[in-house]
Amino acid sequence: MILLKNATFIDYKTLEFKQTDILIEEGKNGKISFSNNLDEKNAEIIDCAGKIVTKSFAVGHHHVYSALARGMGAPKKNPENFYEILKYIWWTLDKSLDKDMIKASALATAIACAKAGSTFVIDHHASPNFIEGSTDIIAEAFDRVGVSHLLCYEITDRDGLEKAEKGLAETENYLKKNQALIGLHASFTVGEKTMQKAADLMQKYNSGFHIHVAEDRYDQDHSLINYGKRVIERLNDYGVLNSSKTILGHCLHLSENEKELINNSNAWVVQNVESNLNNNVGYFNAEGLGEKIMLGTDGMHSDMLRSAQQAFFVGQGFDNIDYPGVYKRFRNVHNYIAENNFTGDGENNLVILDYKSPTPVNKDNFLGHFVFGFNSNDILHVISDGKLIVKNKVVQNVNEPEILQFAQEQAKRLWKRKSNIHQ
């Protein structure tokens, strides 16, 4: 058990402030207790005087496979549009991944997420030349660090139907033993046969799709030309929107009918503002999409506070978003997890911030501090499933310097292999 003494606890749902001691049980369903005179002889005691304690964070859409991309050389051809960004950068990178590169990517990502306050990560993985067992490698890495997860492998026809079948097989093998989703790249790289097989898997395992949707206009143009319907209309025909587990990534270029279909469905939308800016594909606007919108990082980084703040700032010009609205999107991932009975995001997942503010912090102005003040550098301790996984900004379950050295070695291998791939 862990005992937090003298804490300022903020209820993440009501934003009520409470001065209290907090006793935290271990386990996926561990509870927390509040009192001013708690005493537990076997508990690890942490003095939280002057610190903020609240629910930890969660990532609604991540890409472990991009972790070793930072600082890599330029592609052989300068991309002129979104399709070429995929073709010359990301589709050469994911083809280059092997077992050790995936392991390094997952460990580095899990550490980054933990240190930034996230104890649950929804990831979308691709490694076309190392498919079998890739999801297990990521799960094991996250488990080592102590971060809960909801994973999927990216099914796609872009590398041929044989690879698509391997992606389907990897998905089913992982689903048999784990909470997971049916990962697909995007409508424009998934044909009718593969889409149907993925939809059949979704029904068989009562799961949902995790798919990129209308990130660029190319996705819509391809769907209209090849299937005579728009992307969301196509997915709806396969029953994808019926599942409350379905996650629709990006959703930038939608018609009014598509927005209405989403709004009236059980599916969730995940916004990834910085990735959209980086790829110059457009701006997210929540109008007409309903309330089931959460935030992700899309592999750009692992800092959900940063993602929320950028969603707010960029949204001033392109979206209808205010302080309560961005905080709701930031916290909606917990509603997604709870609605679908996924484990790993119980009340014993907490973050302790050493937030040094020159102004008072209270319930009435908390959202102003959330948007303009909070920073991942303020995160001092992180508790996942009742266990301390970050203490005084140091990860506890793995040796971070060793892992970063391993990751750098794998990054060099990855970059060399990537440079030899011909597109």
Image (spheres, rainbow, N blue to C red):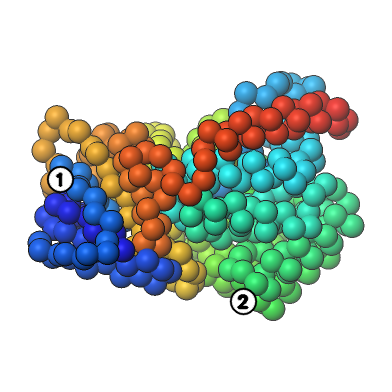
Q: Amino acid at mark 2?
A: Asn
Would you say 220 lies left or right of 263 here?
A: right
Q: Earlier in the sequence, mark 2 or mark 1?
A: 1
Quarter holding residue 176: bottom right
Residue 187 makes an appearance in the image: no
The N terminus lies in quadrant: bottom left
Disc ID at residue 49 = 1
**Residue 182: image location, x then y, percent:** 66, 63
Would you say 69 lies left or right of 77 here?
A: left
The C terminus lies in quadrant: top right
Q: Residue at x 83, y 60 (%)?
A: 166
Q: Residue furthest front?
A: 41
Would you say 316 lies left or right of 112 here?
A: left
**Residue 115: image location, x then y, percent:** 42, 42
Q: Which residue is mark 2?
A: 206
* Location of residue 91 with respect to 123 vertically, above or below: above
Viewer-nearest of discs 2 and 1: 1
Q: How far is the residue under mark 2 from the one under mark 1?
A: 45 Å
**Residue 117: image location, x then y, percent:** 39, 46
Q: Residues within 10 Å of mark 2 (few under 14, many from 20)?
A: few
Q: Residue at x 69, y 30 (%)?
A: 409
